[in-house]
Amino acid sequence: MYYDGLTVSKQSSTKEMDKTLQREINLAKNIQATLLNGSTPKINKGEVIGSSLPARLIGGDYYDFYPLANGKIRIVIGDVMGKGIPAAMLMILTRGAFRTAAESMSSPGATLTAMNQALYNDLRKLKSFVTLFCADWDPDTEILTYANAGHNMPLYINGDNREVTLLPKVKGIMVGGLPNQVYKEETIKLKNNDTVFFYTDGIVEAQNKAGDQYQLERLTRILENHQDSGVGAIEKSVIDSVHSFMDGALQKDDITMVVLKLTYENSNITSLNSPVLNV
């Protein structure tokens, strides 16, 4: 009887620990959602939206908006190596580094340089890294300036010829990869009805039950077909397409995107920021 009682006690203790762990995971999920759910700033000559769908309760993808002087806005999207709680913890660390750098750095390249400087030692100790893409939209010059730290190049939808291509390429090593990095910048002049689609590889690498990947070509077709829609509808069309392709298969990686669309005739538009989609 003593052994049985001890077994029952251990089982009860294990169940209580499981409940505590679940509560803490849910709290972490709420904290992450709250941090990602900051109000989207007003931007001139366009609209913007961001969203993230974690593969688990919490994820390691990251996006953020930071308003700059003279109506500019700094956009960042990133992907922390790994999944779940460890990746989420590093995502919070990345967010703090971005916010600090964005306050003092004058450009996307300088922001990534400062972030790498701040995070490098910690990421090396943890044997991890973060891919990041950072861009500044300037409504006065109508120029998007950007720098890349090992991330997917965003897609550019030309509002005139309606073609979907990659933004002009710019290279840079992932944050945490090497110390003392200087990140180069590239620019593009944007026009009315142009769209820039930032994303993480959880979209193009999503798999169906047969193990086939969604791939960039399918994403390009969806953007071509829905380019006349607003940012919210474009975002939804991508999510719907990915889920239709997966057809019930397990989501293995976080899915995150930011959509920037230029609408010069209707400036000062504020879009709704939907950080976590409950699809």
Image: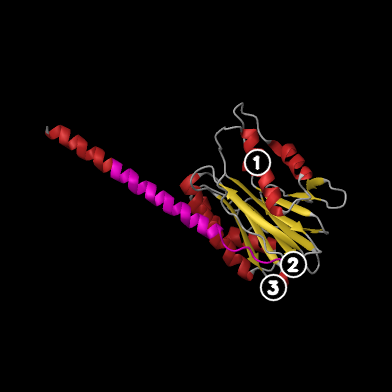
Looking at the image, residue 35 sits to the left or right of residue 146; the answer is: left
Give x and y (percent) for residue 152: 69, 47
Q: Is residue 200 left or right of residue 93?
A: right
> Residue sitting at 56 percent across and 59 percent down?
37
Q: Is residue 66 left or right of residue 32?
A: right
Find the distance from the CA under tag 2 to the CA under tag 1: 29 Å
What quarter of the picture does the C terminus occupy? top right
At label 3, which amino acid type do we have? Ala
Relative horizontal placement of residue 129, taking residue 183 as reference (left or right): left
Q: Which residues are magenta?
A: 15-43
Dot 2 lies on which element? loop
- The secondary element bearing badge 1 is classed as helix
Q: Position of residue 175 (x, y in %)?
A: 60, 53
Q: Residue at x 29, y 45 (%)?
A: 16
Out of 11 and 277, give the one closest to the viewer.
Answer: 277
Mark 3–mark 1 Cα distance, whole angstroms, equals 36 Å
Magenta-span inclusion, residue 247: no
Amino acid under label 2? Answer: Asn
Q: Nearer the viewer, mark 2 or mark 3?
A: 2
Q: Which residue is mark 3?
A: 69
Q: Nearer the viewer, residue 186 or 113?
A: 186
